[in-house]
Image (spheres, rainbow, N blue to C red):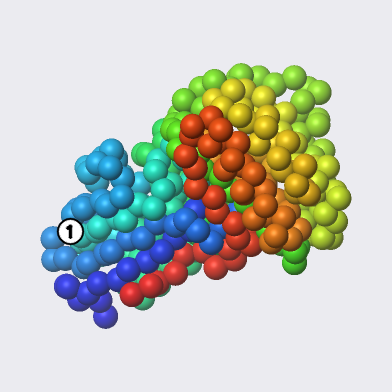
Amino acid sequence: MVKIGDKIKVFAPATVANVACGFDVLGFAIDQPGDELDLEITAEKGVRIKDITGDGGVLPREAEKNSAAVAILEFLQHINADFGCDIVIHKKMPSGSGLGSSAASAVAGVFAANSIFGAPLSKEELLPFLLSAEDAACGSAIADNVAASLFGGFILVRSYEPLEVIQLPIPEKLYATVIFPHLTVLTKEAREILPKEIPLKDSLRQSANLGGLIIGLQTSDYGLISRSLKDYIAEPYRSKLIPGFDDLKKAITANGGLGGSISGSGPSVFALSTDKDIALKIGEEMAKIMKARNIDSDIYVSKVNTQGPKVIE
Ligand code: HSE
């Protein structure tokens, strides 16, 4: 039985959403970075943000505007909890990075709350609270980042109404490289620059590649994965927000990568490869491209993270 003063600390991973051909419907989790969240059970109902570290003071401290607090509050209301929570969020990536920052905090929050209450709800049952959290933080209830962080692995959001998330197979040799150039692109703004309608030709090419990528993952056909990593919907518009984007993409194939695109709504860019050394080399080359433009960056290399959130204390 949970009691006042009980504490838990949870980690939830960053994510790459869209994955080129899967705008708003594909995502995968990576090992690092990831947000951490401390949660303590209180007698007072509701959720209070006691502190946020690592955000440079930019994130809202009001519970109703914060993705983690919104998700926890919906969870507490759903289970009719007699208690509330105090939380401290440790941000390891900024919002506007394209790494699913608000999603990682929300997943850490709701996973912490569910775990400390003895896991009354399944991960599937937690997902709607995370959509509300994304809506509060980014202005749209999109499942790609939250589902990838919550379930881990590589996910397809097959349907939004009703919500249906499918775990995709992950080929043995697959590695991800992610570069986060120290720039900010807000998801809301990156969505506003997209055209409201797309030509039939682009829709056909996009859905053909989405099918190709999924079959490539299923059959470990790396050539098919490579040919399918193309985005006709978002990349042509959003790439203009990322200095040196064309050079970053060239560095992926020039160094033996399968391909890549913008991570989520950017400015981070991801690449997939079949080998850790290739993944590391792509990261090095990408960092050099950004450095030449006087832009600092962080590089993350890992396999797809299949665990999702975890209790760390
Ligand atoms: N799929 C979203 C977008 C990312 O590209 O706008 C945030 O979930």
Q: Which residue is mark 1?
A: 45
Residue 131 relative to residue 216: left or right: left
The quarter of the picture where residue 154 lies is bottom right
Task: Using a 10 Å C-alpha cutoff, classify the residue at mark 1 as few (fewer than 14 neighbours), some (14 to 19) or many (20 or more).
Answer: some
- Point out residue 255 in the picture as x, y percentages from the top left corner: 75, 47
The residue lying toward the viewer, choosing from 234 and 162, is 234
Q: Is 269 rendered above or below residue 113?
A: above
Q: Residue at x 70, y 36 (%)?
A: 249
Give coordinates of residue 190: x percent, y percent.
Answer: 51, 27
Question: How far from the left and from the top, in percent, is residue 127?
Answer: 48, 54
Residue 21 shows up from this direction:
no
* Viewer-nearest residue: 303 or 199: 303
The amino acid on which the numbered mark 1 sits, given as a three-letter code, is Lys
Residue that appears at 53% across and 37% down: 291
Q: Identify the residue shown where x is 82% and y is 38%.
A: 208
Note whether 140 is above or below 240 in the view shown. below
Give how far across and how far down residue 310 sits, in percent.
44, 69
Residues 80 and 242: in front is 242
Count of all numbered marks drawn on residues in the image = 1
Residue farthest toward the bottom in the current orientation of the protein: 1
Assign the C terminus to one quadrant of the image: bottom left
Of the pair 16 and 239, the residue shown nearer to us: 239
Image quadrant holding the N terminus, namely: bottom left
Does residue 61 appear in the picture of this structure? yes
Check the image and report above or below for 64 versus 40. above
